[in-house]
Structure formats: structure tokens, C-alpha cells
Amino acid sequence: MSNGFRLGLFYTIVRPEEKALLAAAERRSLAMVRLSDDEMVFGFERGSLDVDGILNRSVSHSRALYAAHYFEHYGIPAINLPDVLERAGDKILASLRLSARGIPTPRTVVALTGESALKALDEIGYPAVLKPPVGSWGRLMAKVTDRESAEQILEHKGALSSPVHSIFYVQEYIPKPDRDLRVFVVGDRVVGAMLRRSESWRTNAARGASTEPLPVTPELAELSLRAADAMGGGVLAVDLMESPRGLVVHEVNPTPEFKALQAATGVDIADTILDYALQRWRR
Ligand SMILES: Nc1ncnc2c1ncn2[C@@H]1O[C@H](COP(=O)(O)OP(=O)(O)O)[C@@H](O)[C@H]1O
Ligand SMILES: [Mg+2]
């Protein structure tokens, strides 16, 4: 099926996902060029990158986002598009977008200083969840149970000089069952879904949650496709929780891992991503 099309793989480290993409390309005799985000330098001149399309798989939000802007400048089609990475990769922008589209999502308040964060937490009520606006794998999130722990966590955050800790994303805690839902969307299709179950309130697969395949109900498909569309579409993993008032979308991942989903569902996600990319880009 090779016709000289050269696909770039922009990556940080070759995880099982990138291995699966490389293997899927190899099975089709499709040339896949590795572009390391550690090594690349981006100038104004177009034409320095000899590829016809790029899968942007950098694990860093800022690297993925800046690179995506350059890929666009060079006229090279890439997944995902910069606007999509920007919106979905930042929980504040993603929440705004979900809310604007009327997609059910946990109640969320943003504060720009430690002092106002305390007000935000009081407004949301306890328990509340404090998340870094940019981040993944459930890292650096806190479940804040009362005002006293709120003050202590904010004091700790105030002592850290990182920009990630100076903007406060405060969300109502959803008393969900011991699991959440992960739905993988490629273009206008749901290609697989799973439950992630854990004793911890953070049910990320990367934190060791156990996974099982999840049948996709029409409601789940509709919500997930709307959430993906709200971000601008592409290859996106939608995270949902079962709240007492029904399903809520809490995150849309623009550079999703899929090892656990592939194992749980048996769906070849890497292959599906390649199909989608080639279908969009091959003329
Ligand atoms: N508001 C919430 N209430 C209860 N649990 C939550 C809430 N937000 C997140 N979680 C749990 O924490 C996990 C990680 O949160 P998420 O917003 O998806 O951040 P990350 O980008 O780190 O995956 C979720 O999969 C879910 O299990
Ligand atoms: Mg998540």
C-alpha cells in the first residue's frame, strides 16, 4: 500500500503507543520518519521537513502546541491541530468550551491567586478537587476535604514558584463509583471505550487502575462525539464520570495514550489512527 507517502512521528519517548504506530506503519510498508522533540529546531523557512503528514505525539503540552503551530506554518498536515491541542490540553480552556457547548461537565471555578483560590474552594464547597490547568496521569491533583486542608495545600502551592501552581482550577468533587469512563474518538467515530476502576479516587490507567471494555451506549457515544467536536475534532480521548445527575465529561485528552484501551478492547487503535490520517491526507 506504499505510494511514497512519508509520515512523521513527532515524539518525546517511544512508548508502547509510538511502538504500535511504528509497527502499524511497517505492516503497510509506509515510511514513518521519527522526529524527536528533544532535537528539532524550528525556523521560519518552509520545506525543511521532508514529510507529508505528522502524528504529533509529544508528551509535553507546550512542545506539542508550539510544534503544531510550526507544522501548520510549514503547510504539513498534522494530528492534532494546534487549536485542538490548545483547547483540550488546557483544562481551563477545555472546561470553558464544554460549558459553552452545553455539554454536562463538573462545576468548575478558576482563580488566579492563592487568596482567591480559597474563595473559589469555599464557593465550590468541600470536598473539592484542585487540578493543575495543564497536566496528566492525575499528577499534582488534590482532593481538598475541608477549609483547613485547603489553607495548607494553598500554602504549599504558594511556596512553589512554578507557573503550574499559580493558577487554580477548582472543581466540585463528583462522588462517582470506583471508576470512570474513557472513550476514544477518531474523527467522527467512537473506536473503543473502557472503564477504569481503582480504589483511589484518581482512576488513571497510568496510576494502576484496572481496565475493562465498556459497551458504547448511544448516550455515551453522543456525549463523547460532542465533547471531541467541541475541541475541534481529531484523535481525542474523552474522560467521563458517572455523577448523581448523569454522565459528565471532565477531560478531553489531545495526545492520548492507548495501550490500556487497546489491551482492554482488542481494538487496534494505532491502525485506526493511521487509517484516519491517511484517509484525510492522501490525495
Ligand atoms: N471532579 C472530580 N471528582 C471526582 N474524581 C475526579 C474529578 N476529577 C478527576 N477525577 C478523577 O481523577 C482522574 C484524573 O483527572 P483528570 O481531570 O482526567 O486529569 P488528568 O489529566 O491528570 O488525567 C479522573 O480520571 C477521575 O478518576
Ligand atoms: Mg484524565
Image (cartoon, rainbow, N blue to C red):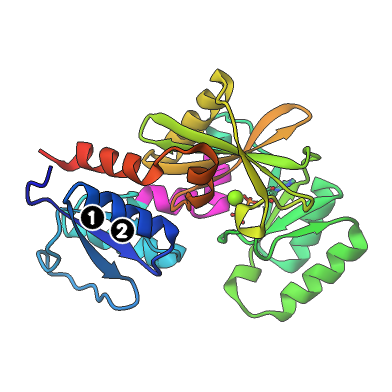
Q: Residue furthest left?
A: 3
What secondary structure prevails in the magenta region? helix
Mark number displayed over residue 228: none
Is the C terminus in the top left, top right, bottom left or bottom right quadrant? top left
Amino acid type at circle 1 is Glu
Query: Could you say whether the residue bearing mark 2 is in a helix, strand or loop?
Result: helix
- For residue 14, side relative to residue 201 (left or right): left
Tell me the residue at 90%/59% (across/down).
147
Query: What is the number of callouts on the image?
Result: 2
Where is residue 219? Give x, y as percent: 58, 21
Residue 68's disc number: 2
Is disc 1 in contact with disc 2, using a CB cutoff of under 8 Å? yes
Image coordinates of residue 44 in percent, x first then y, are 17, 70
Amino acid type for the residue under numbered disc 2 = Ala
State the residue at coordinates (85%, 47%). 125
> Which of the 4 quarters of the picture holds residue 57?
bottom left
Q: Find disc 1 in the rendering and name its residue.
A: 72
Ligand 1 neighbours mark 1 (CB distance < 8 Å): no
Q: Residues within 10 Å of mark 2 (few under 14, many from 20)?
A: many
The residue at the far top in this view is: 218
Quadrant, the N terminus: top left
Q: Residue at x 34, y 49 (%)?
A: 80
Using the numbered discs, state the Cα–Cα distance from disc 1 to disc 2 in whole angstroms: 6 Å
Say which quarter of the image contains residue 269.
top left
Viewed as shown, does residue 80 lie left or right of 221? left
Magenta segment boundaries in residue numbering = 83-97
Q: Position of residue 152 (x, y in %)?
A: 85, 71
Q: Position of residue 116 (x, y in %)?
A: 75, 61
